[in-house]
Image (cartoon, rainbow, N blue to C red):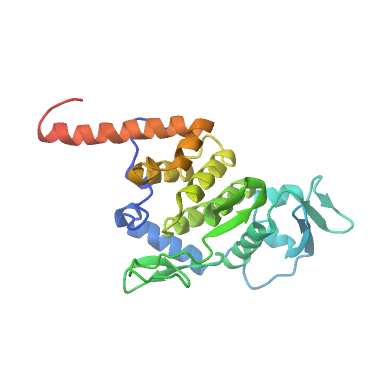
C-alpha cells in the first residue's frame, strides 16, 4: 500500500496543532465552494423512499432523486434491497446515527457539526467547537459515536468516511477526513479502535484515512509507546501494523536523508 515516500499531504497533523501547509488555498476554495453548493437544489419532486435502518429499525424518508446521488442507492433502488410496491429500502447493517449524517450531507452538503471557514483566521473550524485553548476551531463537539458492533466508541468522522466509501460519495470522504483532522484530545483507546474500524471497512487501496492514523501514531509515538492499549492491539495483530512499520521506516529514511544533505552519514 505504501511506497518509498510518505508524503506530508497524507499525514495527519499533531493532535493539538496540525500543519497548515497540508491544505492548500486551492483546496480550501474548492471545499468552501462545495459547502456553499449542497448536492441537491431547492426543487424536490421525486417520490419519497422509506428507509429502514439498523438492527433495531429506525425509519427514515428521503427523495429518490437525492438518494440517487449515491451509486449505491441508484443500484439499490433497482435491486434486491428495494421493495417496489412499498418504495422501501432495508439497511439492517447500517447505524442510524451515521445514516442520519449521510442524509444530512445529501440534502445540505455537510453534517453536524458543520465545517465553517473562519475568514479572520483564514482557516476552517467546526461549528460550535470548544476553543478554550485558542486552538483554532478544534473541539470535542460530536466527535465520537458508540457503535455496538465495533465494540465501543469510535471517532464519528471515521465511521462517516467508511459509510461514504460504501455509498460511493467521494466528496463526503474528503469532508469527513478534513473534519476529523480538526478534532483533538482523543484518547488512545478511541484512536486505536477507530483505526481498526478504518482498516476493516476500507479497501486496501485506501491511502487517505489509513495514512491519517499511521501518521497520527508516528507523530504521537511517545504517548502510544507507553500505552497498554497499543501493546494489546499489536499482540492481536492486523495489517495496519505492517503498514505502520513501513510508514515508520519511511519516516526514519526521511530524517536520514535530511541529515545526509547537511552532513553525509548513514545509520
Tell me the quarter of the picture where residue 112 sits: bottom right
Residue in the image at 45% along x and 61% along y:
31
Residue in the image at 65% along x and 56% along y:
69
Residue in the image at 46% along x and 56% along y:
180
Tell me the quarter of the picture where residue 10 sits: top left
The answer to whether residue 255 of the structure is visible from this angle is yes
Q: Is residue 115 left or right of residue 21?
A: right
Residue in the image at 59% along x and 42% along y:
201
Which residue occupies the extreme right position in the image?
Answer: 85
Residue 155 spot, x, y in % from top left: 53, 54
Q: Is residue 196 left or right of residue 103?
A: left
Looking at the image, is 237 positioned above or below residue 73? Answer: above
Residue 267 vs residue 2, the one in the foreground: 267
Q: How many marks?
A: 0
Residue 2 spot, x, y in % from top left: 41, 32
Looking at the image, is 131 positioned above or below residue 160? Answer: below
* Quadrant that contains the C terminus: top left
Which residue occupies the extreme top position in the image?
Answer: 266
Residue 134 spot, x, y in % from top left: 33, 70
Residue 23 vs residue 46, the one in the foreground: 23
Residue 267 vs residue 202, the one in the foreground: 267
The answer to whether residue 237 of the structure is visible from this angle is no
Residue 17 spot, x, y in % from top left: 32, 58
Q: Is residue 177 left or right of residue 168?
A: left
Q: Is residue 58 left or right of residue 130?
A: right
Amino acid at each position: 500500500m505504501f511506497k518509498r515516500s510518505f508524503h506530508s499531504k497524507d499525514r495527519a497533523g499533531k493532535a493539538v496543532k496540525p500543519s497548515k501547509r497540508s491544505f492548500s488555498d486551492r483546496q480550501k476554495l474548492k471545499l468552501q465552494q462545495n459547502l456553499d453548493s449542497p448536492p441537491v437544489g431547492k426543487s424536490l419532486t421525486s417520490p419519497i423512499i422509506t428507509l429502514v435502518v439498523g438492527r433495531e429499525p429506525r425509519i427514515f424518508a428521503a427523495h429518490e432523486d437525492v438518494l440517487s446521488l449515491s451509486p449505491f442507492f441508484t443500484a439499490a433502488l433497482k435491486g434486491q434491497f428495494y421493495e417496489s410496491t412499498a418504495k422501501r429500502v432495508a439497511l439492517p447493517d447500517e447505524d442510524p446515527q451515521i445514516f442520519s449524517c449521510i442524509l444530512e450531507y445529501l440534502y445540505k452538503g455537510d453534517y453536524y457539526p458543520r465545517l465553517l471557514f473562519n475568514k479572520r483566521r483564514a482557516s476552517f473550524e467546526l461549528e460550535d467547537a470548544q476553543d478554550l485553548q485558542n486552538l483554532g476551531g478544534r473541539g470535542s463537539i460530536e466527535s465520537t459515536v458508540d457503535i455496538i458492533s465495533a465494540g465501543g466508541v469510535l471517532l464519528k468522522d471515521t465511521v462517516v468516511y467508511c459509510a461514504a466509501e460504501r455509498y460511493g460519495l467521494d466528496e463526503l470522504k474528503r469532508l469527513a477526513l478534513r473534519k476529523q483532522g480538526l478534532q483533538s484530545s482523543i484518547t488512545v483507546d478511541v484512536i486505536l479502535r477507530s483505526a481498526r474500524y478504518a482498516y476493516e471497512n476500507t479497501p486496501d487501496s485506501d491511502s487517505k484515512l489509513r495514512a491519517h492514523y499511521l501518521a497520527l501514531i508516528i507523530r504521537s509515538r511517545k504517548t502510544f509507546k507507553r500505552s497498554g492499549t497499543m501493546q494489546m492491539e499489536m499482540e492481536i495483530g492486523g495489517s495496519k501494523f505492517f503498514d505502520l512499520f513501513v510508514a515508520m521506516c519511511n519516516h526514519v529514511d526521511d530524517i536520514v536523508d535530511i541529515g545526509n544533505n547537511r552532513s553525509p552519514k548513514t545509520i
